[in-house]
Image: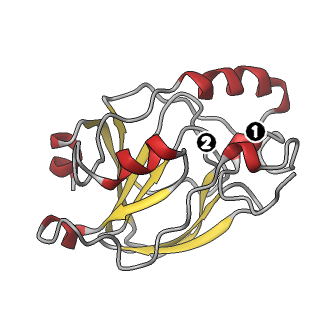
């Protein structure tokens, strides 16, 4: 998976787990590839959606997407990377950082490539239509490029449709892209 991400321009890779506390990155998009084990990941802040992930699953998180590991197997191993090795920060929703975080997120460019399928992949088409979270593939997608994850991807959320000031991560509507709340 490391090589696949790198070939598609998602660099600055690390190998570890997923933090057990809600956090987000305001300066970079992130791809998380599950190499081993299983986990339940919460996306979108404390009231976000839970996803059970396992070996071969890939999550692509737009800048500002709150995420945490709610539980995992002892053998969980994750590879994370960023488009063009974007520098990432670690934010936890401090209300005093709200203006800075919003400004950061607004300047993060869309990724030039999909971490699994490259420049012609579904991520580019999806994100150019609207920013959101999309699971874009699993290890089988290398052999079957049209195939995506073994689980249905969530529908992308439009941050403009999220309730401003919703509690979660500093009340930032862009930090909870999967929130079902609407204005």
Q: Is residue 4 above or below residue 90?
A: below
The front one of 98 and 137 is 137
Instruction: Give the percent coordinates (x, y) of residue 129.
Output: 49, 45
Q: CA distance from mark 2 to mark 1?
A: 8 Å
Toward the left, the furthest residue is 143
* Residue to which mark 2 is pinned: 24
Instruction: Give the percent coordinates (x, y) of residue 78.
Output: 36, 58
Dividing the picture into quarters, in which one does residue 76 lie?
bottom left
Q: Residue at x 30, y 29 (%)?
A: 84
Report the number of numbered marks: 2
Q: Which numbered disc flags the more N-terminal residue, 2 or 1?
A: 2
Dividing the picture into quarters, in which one does residue 159 lie?
top right
Instruction: Give the percent coordinates (x, y) of residue 176.
Output: 70, 50
Instruction: Give the percent coordinates (x, y) of residue 148.
Output: 31, 70
Q: Is residue 96 left or right of residue 36?
A: right
**Label 1 crowding class (10 Å Cα cut-off): few <14, some 14-19, many 20+?**
many
**Residue 93, disc:** 1
Would you say the residues marked 2 and 1 are in contact, meaning their CB atoms lie under 8 Å apart? Answer: yes
Q: SS of the residue at dot 2?
A: loop
Q: Is residue 19 left or right of residue 167?
A: left
């Amino acid at each position: 998976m490391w090589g696949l991400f790198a070939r598609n321009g998602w660099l600055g890779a690390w190998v570890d787990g997923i933090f057990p506390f809600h956090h987000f990155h305001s300066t970079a998009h992130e791809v998380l590839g599950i190499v081993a084990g299983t986990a339940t990941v919460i996306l979108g802040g404390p009231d976000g959606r839970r996803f059970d992930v396992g070996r071969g699953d890939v999550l692509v998180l737009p800048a500002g997407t709150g995420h945490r590991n709610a539980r995992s197997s002892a053998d969980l191993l994750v590879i994370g990377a960023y488009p063009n090795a974007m520098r990432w920060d670690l934010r936890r929703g401090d209300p005093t950082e709200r203006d800075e975080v919003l400004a950061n997120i607004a300047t993060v460019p869309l990724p030039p490539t999909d971490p699994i399928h490259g420049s012609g992949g579904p991520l580019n088409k999806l994100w150019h239509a609207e920013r959101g979270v999309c699971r874009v593939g699993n290890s089988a997608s290398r052999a079957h490029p049209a195939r995506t994850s073994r689980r249905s991807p969530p529908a992308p959320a439009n941050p403009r449709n999220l309730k401003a000031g919703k509690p979660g991560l500093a009340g930032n509507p862009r930090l909870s892209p999967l929130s079902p709340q609407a204005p």
